[in-house]
Image (cartoon, rainbow, N blue to C red):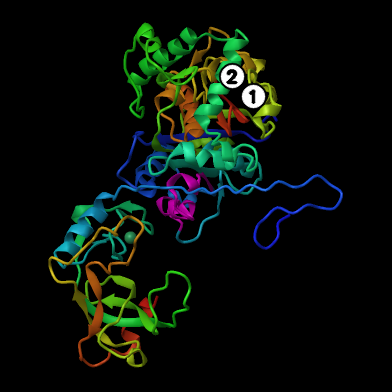
Amino acid sequence: MTDTAGNATTTSGDEPVTMMEYFMQLEYSDVVSAPVMRFRDALMDARLIAQQCPKCKLVYVPPKGYCPIDTVELDERNEIQLADRGVVTNYTVVTPVQYYGQKETEPFVRASILLDPPGGMLILQDVLDIPVAEVRAGMRVEAVWAPKGERDVDEIGNRSGSALEGSLRGFRPTGEPDMPAEAFSDKVW
Amino acid sequence: MAALKDVAIIGYAQARNERQAQATEVQFLFPVINEALEMSKIPRREIGFTCAGSCDYLSGQTFAFVMNLEAVGAWPPISESHVEMDGAWALYEAWVRLQHEDIDTALVFGSGKSSPGNPAEIYPLQMDPYTLTPLGFDPVSSAAIQARALLDAGKVTERQMAEIAARSRRDAMKNPYAQVTGEFDVDELLAQPYVTAPLRKHDLPPISDGACAVVLATGDKAREVCERPAWIRGIDHRIEAHQPGMRDLTTSRSTRLAGEAAGVGSAPIEVAELSATFTHQEPILREALGLGDQVAINPSGGALSANPVMAVGLARIAEAAKQIVEGGRRRTLGHATSGMCLQQNLVCVLEGEQ
Ligand SMILES: [Zn+2]
C-alpha cells in the first residue's frame, strides 16, 4: 500500500511492502506510405489530392491506397486534384479546459468541410476570420494556406488524417450565400 | 482433440517479408487477402466467418486490428473476430466456428508490422510486471537462457545450431517470401561474435513486416472448389506457466501434449513447418513432437528466414498445407508458438487424400 505521496506503508503485523517505481516509454517510428508521401508533396504546393474509387466513386483524402468498401487497391492512376473550397457541413464549438499542455484559452471551432466537386471531406478544420457564434452549417468557405516557405508537412504521416495545420491553416468564409442543408445532408460527419 | 467435422485449407497467401515495409499493415494485407480468396475460388461475400490475429503494440497504433478489417471488405457488415495472438490461433477459432453446422467457409489472417518499434522494449511488457518487465526480459535474453540450458544439458551444440541456421537460409532461397536467404558456411557463422551468449546473429530470427491469409472450407464445399484440399486432421494448443523460471526450458511439454492430442504420432509425418524462431528451439520441438531424421523440417526456411510476428505461425500452417495442395504430400504438420521460450504451442496436422 502507499500513502498519497506514493511512499510505501506497511500493513499491520506483516512484512513491510516494498514499492518500486518503473518508468517506461515506447518509441515508434513509422515510415510514411507512398500515397501519403504524394499527399505531403501536394500540400507543400498548396494543393489537396485524394484517391477516388473507380467503383463506388468515394473520395479518400488523404489517399489511403485502397477502397475498403470495394476492396480494390488504389494508386497514382486513381489520384485526383481536389477543390480547396467547400461548405461547412457540421461543427463543434470547443471550450478549452485548462489541462496541462492546453494552449487554447478561448472557445474555438472544429468543422467538417465538404469540398466542392469532385468532393472529399476534411474533418476537424479550424474556421478563421469569423466570430465563433456566427459559424453555421451550410456556410461557404475557402482554404487558408500557409504562405509558401512557411509550409511544413513534418507532422503528416500515415496516422495524421485531416490534421494539416502546418500547411493548411483552416478555412474562412467566402461570403457566398449559404447552401441548403439538402445539398450536403447525406455527407454530414 | 481429433477433428469432428472435416475442415480443409483450400487457399493461402503470404506477403513478401521485409525488414521495414513502406506500406502500412492494411496496405500490405490487401493483396495477401485478395490472393488467398482468389486461390480458394470462394467469392468474398460468401465467406461465413473471418478471424484475424494481430497485436496493436507492434505497430504502436490503438485499434490497428480494426483498421486491418479494411483489407477484408467488412461492408455490408460481416461476422468476424480477432485474437491478440498469432494468426494460427485465429485459424483455431475459425476451425471451432466451422464445427457449427451453419457456415461452410472461413477466412483467417495474421499480420504484423514489427519495424516501427523496438522488440527489446515492447516484449518485456507481456511478462510479470514485478519481477521480469523491469529487468527488460526480452526475447533474445530469454532465448539465450534457454539455449544455455540446452547446451549445458548436452542436448545441442553451437555447431548444430549454426547448421540449422545455414540449412534454413539455404532452403529459404526457394521461398519468394523469405527475408534472410543464401549459402552460409557453418565455420564462418561460428566465427561470428555472440549477440547475447550463447546466441550469435544467425541463431536469431530477423525482424520482419509481413502477413499471411488462409481460407478454410468444410467437407463437400472444400472438394467442390479444390482439387486437393489439405484436411485438418488434428489441431490442439496448450499453455505452460507464464513465469519461465517455473518450467524446464530444455523441453516443451505443451508442444508434446498438443502434438499427442492432434494425433501427430498416429502416422508418419513427411514435412513439419515449425515456429522455431531461435535455432536451438528446433531440436526442442523435434523431440517434443517425436520427429525423426526422415521428416523434412522447414523446407520454406522457417521462422529463421522470416519472422512476421503474429503471422509466422499461420505461415507455417500455410506452408504445411502447400506441401499437400501443391506438393502432393500425404501428411504434414504446422506448428505455432507464442510467449517467451515456447510458452504456448499449437500443432496442426494436415492430410491430403490418397
Ligand atoms: Zn469503392
- Mark 2 crowdedness (10 Å alpha carbons): few <14, some 14-19, many ≥20: many
Residue A133 — which label?
none
Residue type at the position of mark 2 = Leu
* Foreground of the two, B235 or B65: B65
**Label 1 is placed on what type of residue?**
Thr
Magenta span: B50-74
Q: Residue at coordinates 59% horizontally, 47% vertically from top-left?
A: B103
Q: Is residue A183 left or right of residue B238?
A: left
* Quadrant into which the N terminus of chain B falls: top right
For the point 31% across and 82% down, which residue is it? A88
- Percent across and percent down for residue B209 are 39, 38
Q: Which residue is mark 2?
A: B285
Measured Cα–Cα span from mark 1 to mark 2: 7 Å
Question: Which quarter of the picture shows residue B349?
Answer: top right
Q: Which residue is disc 1 drawn over?
A: B255
On the image, the x and y values in percent for residue B223 come to 52, 33
Give me the residue at 28% from left, 67% from top.
A164
| Along the line of sight, the residue nearer the viewer: B197 or A55 | B197
Q: Is residue B100 left or right of residue B196?
A: right
Q: Position of residue B204 (x, y in %)?
A: 45, 24
Q: Can you see residue B85?
A: no
Q: Is residue B22 visible?
A: yes
Query: The residue tagged with tag 2: helix, strand or loop?
Result: helix
In this rendering, position of residue A47 left or right of residue A178: left
Of residue A152 and residue A141, the one placed in the foreground of this image is A152
The vertical placement of A122 against B159, above or below, is below
The local secondary structure at tag 1 comes to helix
Cβ atoms under marks 1 and 2 closer than 8 Å = yes
